[in-house]
Image (cartoon, grey):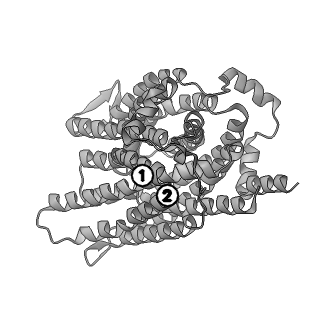
Amino acid sequence: MEPRLTDDLKNSIYDGMFANAFATLTGGVFLTGFALYLGMNDFMIGLVAAMPFMVTVFQLPAAYLAQKTGKRKQIAYWSATFARGLWLPILIATLLPIASGSMKLLVILALIFLSHSFVSVSYVSWLSWIAELVPEEIRGRFFSTRNMLCGAAGMIAMVAFGKLLDKLDGHTYGGLPIGFSITFISAVLFGMISLHFVNRISEPKHGSEMASPISIRMLVYLPFKERNFRNFLTFTFLWSFSVYVASPFFTLYFLRDLKFTYGFVALLGMLSAIADMVGMRVWGRISDTVKNKAVIRVSSWIAITLPLAWISARPESVVIPITLHIVGGGFWAGINLCTNNLLLKISPQEHRSSYISAFHIVGGLGSALGPIVAGYVLKSIGSLDLHLLSWHLFPIQVIFMASTLFRLLSFQLFKFVHEPEEVTVGQMVRILRSVRGLTMANGFNSLLHPFVEIAGQERKGES
């Protein structure tokens, strides 16, 4: 491997770690807690959860601009700069001297929407750029290493600032909540450090997408023209809807219904992140051996049952939340890693950004629709006394049951998506039995040696 490429891959990892710290502190438990502090209802919280997916429509003009100009790095860099900087006005907006509380919430929602819009534009440009930069033969291992370390950075940020919020709960200064102020200001700082490393990554001068520039109309049409990719998009829409009917409401469930503290939710997030890191390494090695579709099939059956399993949790529960976060983190790592790799595998290199943007727009529409529908349902049934046999149900638990059913039904469409050189689950098991070194122990070992794959490839290139 060329020294320049090695430096680029390392800088991409450093960028990802600080970027994930920013994303962690401006999303998940922190954003839900901030929404509760502002007095948002279930529907508004569902709307906030839908925003990162509603804005995927902006990826289409971003993809067109990227393929027309070839300046993917500049688009990714400046979009990310605006997205992260907007969190300072979001915090300041809580001080606006507006008599109507609903008007203040609308201003904050508009700023959050704008921030997510820039994130969406940045992401499609970044992924198209990095996909061309990273050689395909090490893509699985590189992204698993990168995702693992990003998860570690997010885990540290979640635990540290979760404890901070618990300690500073109820404290304000000048009308601003001190805990959220420190959290969001730190998030912006981490985001700007990330941009320093983004700026140090090189960009291929003659991207393959520039070989034959096309109109924006054709850019929209291309991904839907190919049958296999069209099947992938159909599955993605329905699966995303099924997952995000429930996913954004887990944090609300923890904080409001189960009465978990920020610290305990952060601990659960840390355990999930550790499981995710180990899972990324294990599934990354496995996917390089058996490709991606078999890994997704195995991991998704666990993801299907997880929402239903959460119904058994109670306010005094400890073992159940810990177990579900560890299991979920490990298996969702396989889904997330291999879905991304499958996307890159079945999208042609020429005009790849249009395929990537189509995937995120279609998936984003499903993901946005899920929490909006769920938020409306929760608002409608919130006052009802619900029971299942002798069990008293929280309204959110009804949403969890629906999510499991929707996931089960939508996943049946995955069999119509084909991957080059794919293997069945049975073949995957037989292959793994004959391959040494794919153990959980190796996953933990990789945590201690995060750049082992990059260094190994460099030594191979020198020999």
Q: Position of residue 420 (x, y in %)?
A: 64, 28
Q: CA distance from mark 1 to mark 2?
A: 8 Å
- Tag 1: amino acid: Leu
Q: Is the C-beta separation of discs 1 and 2 under 8 Å? A: yes
Classed neighbour count for the residue bearing mark 2: other residues with Cα under 10 Å, few (<14), some (14–19), many (≥20): some
Q: Residue furthest right?
A: 463
> Residue drawn 26% across and 46% down?
42
Task: Indicate the quadrant where residue 188 lies.
Answer: bottom left
Q: Is residue 378 visible?
A: yes
Q: Nearer the viewer, residue 261 or 227?
A: 227
Question: Where is residue 391 drawn, in percent x and y?
Answer: 36, 30
Q: Residue at x 44, y 47 (%)?
A: 63
Q: According to the image, label 2 marks what residue? A: 71
User: Viewed as shown, does residue 1 lie left or right of 202?
Assistant: right
Q: Earlier in the sequence, mark 1 or mark 2?
A: 1
Q: Is residue 341 above or below residue 423?
A: below
Of residues 267 and 117, which is closer to you in this image? 117
Label 2, secondary structure: give it.
loop
- As shown in the figure, which amino acid type bears the numbered disc 2? Lys
In the picture, which quadrant includes the C terminus? bottom right
Crowding around mark 1 (Cα neighbors within 10 Å: few <14, some 14 to 19, many 20+) is some
Q: Pointer 1: what residue?
A: 65
Q: Residue furthest bottom?
A: 174
The quadrant holding residue 31 is bottom left
Query: Is residue 425 positioned above or below 359 on the image?
Result: above
Quadrant into which the N terminus falls: bottom right
